[in-house]
Image (spheres, rainbow, N blue to C red):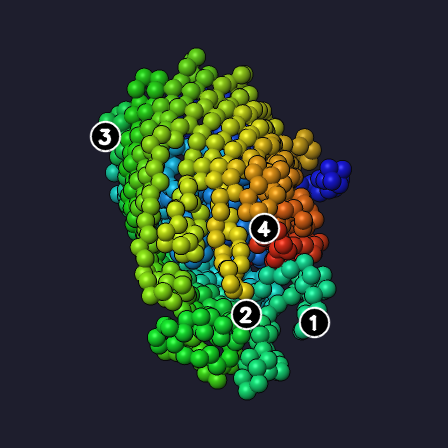
Amino acid sequence: MLAQYRTTLLASLLLADSSWAAQAATSSEPQLSKVVVVGARVNEASSAIGEDKISNTLTISHQALLSAPAGTSGLKMLEALPGFNVQVNDALGLYEFGNSVFVRAFNLQQIGFSIDGVPLGRTDQFGGSPIYRYVDNENTERVTASTGAGDVTQDGYASLGPYVDYQTSNPSAEPGASLSYTLGSDSLRRSFVKLQSGEHQGLSAYFSRSKIDGDLWRGPGTIDREHLEAKVRYRFGERDEIWLRAVHNSFYDYDSPSVSLAQYHGSSNDPFGRSGRDFAYLGSLPALPESVPGVRYSNSNYNQYYKQAVNQRRDTLYSLGGQFQLRPDLLNYTTLYYEAKKGFGVSPEAYSTSLSLHNAESNVPGLYDPKGLQYGLSALSGHRFGGRTGLQWLVGAHQIDSGLWAETDVFNRQQGRYNLSDGSPTGERLLNEPVHLQGDFSSTRNSLQYHLKDTWSLLDDRLLLQAGFKSLHLEYRIEGYRNAGDYINNRQPRLSTQWNDAFLPQAGLVYNLTDDTQVFASYSENMALPRGADDIFRTASPSAPPPKAERAKNYEVGYRINRPSFNASWALYRTDFDNRLQSFASPVPGSSQVETYYQNVGKVQAYGTELSGQWKLPILAEKVVLNGNLTYNKSTFRNDAGGLSISGNDVPDSPRWLAQAGLTYEVTPWAVVNFSGRYIGERYSNFTNSESVPGYTLYNAYLDLSGERLPYTALRKFKLRFNVDNLFDKDYLGYILTSTSGPAVFRPGSPRTFQTTLSMDL
């Protein structure tokens, strides 16, 4: 495997053009010499290597975001960073139920996300706040990611270490407009319009709209996404400003099925002859024999018709914030926010399944006998509001940071199965004819966090010492009909619990060995609200004890070098993760049904190394820059659980090796070309490590042609960009819905896709 990996790495010129830009260091932090590696799409070296940070912290710049295919989700962009195993369903990462991220010992639900400092909480597609609903790359200034441990000043209850912060761009000082239009594979059409007011006596604003329409790359169905953003900023002092931001995201799309290895390889005897990466739902209604005499649509294979598998969401986030210089040595920041969400998902249910569950709920009034295929509706709504405030105080060689964050998150969900007219998959939905009910509940999360941190500069600013802690208090409550059992037993329990830790420490240092080298080290402890809390409490007995909070300890040391034509960052790490929760299933005594429950599988331990850097090659007038990163990560279970012998096994979907590299060549000031590759190693798909998928390498390329103002026109700048993803049309399995011991299901990666974008500034 290692030899195969090395061959792949050498053959590929790995890493896409992913220039990184870290947040500016505070005045009390030590600094390397301000030498830079300069090239097209490449930022100064202090950004590329996370200079002056106590942990491995790297950033994706605004220019790198704009070099990606137009409409690429903010989550998919993380694949450019070392250590991030990002899997998506399509080239842009738009299908929400096909997104996954693993970094070190953690998955997407255990990573903290924020935008302009506003924490986004859980990333669940049902009721959560996934980052890709709240950003467009054109309005994002930078994305800063900590693979090991985010700063204690970063708020939230989801992170067990990794943290990703998205910073939006400020309105420009000059009035103007930006326009772009994209055409791509699978009938993709994307438009983007942004209007800038310019700055007038400190006041500036912008408004933007993007619209995506296209077809699914696999099977029938369409994608429809509309995204609106507005930001107003008012500056009234050297360091005083307030801003208001609003973002609204609306999408409607069709599902595509996950597939087993047998279905993918064509050995499952699929009744419709489907196999391979094009395995999809049916675009037309088949003629199938009746499974139950007299019931026209009783055949379970009618659930393969695509119009019964859709998703719709509408999310809106408002945030109001500012920073205020109270004294020359004292700065305050404050942010308030409110989020509203609403949507639904539909999935079909076969007649035999509906009949069995309908009979189990025979004592529930108001139910109807099933007519055929069932309309499976899961509706959701909710709101979230909170605020954060803090002080930054300079006292001699010390910078003291303290702050407070509080939030309430309310989520409502209703689930049921309803008849369709004549039981037909093409029939009208009959929401007045419920067949069986699955839930109607509300859950509430109340969060409170306090942090305190001291950053101390010593030895003529060559040494930075940092120590701090956060205090996290979480309350959870669920009430209503949680599941079918609550309907059957005519109960609406109210379950509640809380998790508290008054002292979650973090400590670290940065030391300048020379003017161009640094060493860094950090240690942190984190606690998170148990992932999937709603699912845990929905399936548990009302008398069952609540789960323990998930916890992690993160250790890290590293080295940075920054020279005029070369810079790099190298980190070694270890993570200890306690109280990992995983779903299991067991037969219900006296019944053929199974019951799903969550069990603590104990400790997971990860260790490894991350190396990243960029090199300005001394060829072609130094217009060529090579970027690259390499990650080795071993993440294993340390305990047996659920009757399974898994101690020592690899955590599923955690490849040992990840690598990227890319070559960017500035042919002329108006033409830039990039060729890149990304390698993902072999991954197990279940806890027992009895099934795996091979590693793969994907290659991408782009060409940017840009120019300045054209004579006799209002254009200030224009750009024509050509992107090709999966250049050599690799056929592979990406996203894994992992299992405990049996076969998992997967989502095939998308084939080669083309995209052309014309952009202009007025």
Instruction: Name the residue tied to disc 3.
Output: 326
Q: Earlier in the sequence, mark 2 or mark 3?
A: 2
Distance of mark 4 from mark 3, alpha carbons?
55 Å
Across and down, in percent, residue 314 comes to 39, 61
Across and down, in percent, residue 660 comes to 64, 41
Distance of mark 4 from mark 2, alpha carbons?
32 Å
Badge 1 element: loop
Q: Residue 79 or 168: which is nearer the viewer?
A: 79
* Farthest residue, direction left: 326
Across and down, in percent, residue 536 comes to 43, 52
Q: Residue at x 57, y 28 (%)?
A: 572
Instruction: Name the residue tied to disc 1.
Output: 273
Distance of mark 3 from mark 1, alpha carbons?
70 Å
Q: Residues within 10 Å of mark 1 (few under 14, many from 20)?
A: few
Badge 2 element: loop
Instruction: Name the residue tied to disc 2.
Output: 221
Instruction: Name the residue tied to disc 4.
Output: 740
> Is disc 4 in contact with disc 1, using a CB cutoff of under 8 Å?
no
Q: Is residue 230 left or right of residue 692?
A: left
Badge 4 element: loop
Badge 3 element: strand
Q: Residue at x 58, y 57 (%)?
A: 90
Q: How many marks?
A: 4
> Is disc 2 in contact with disc 1, using a CB cutoff of under 8 Å?
no
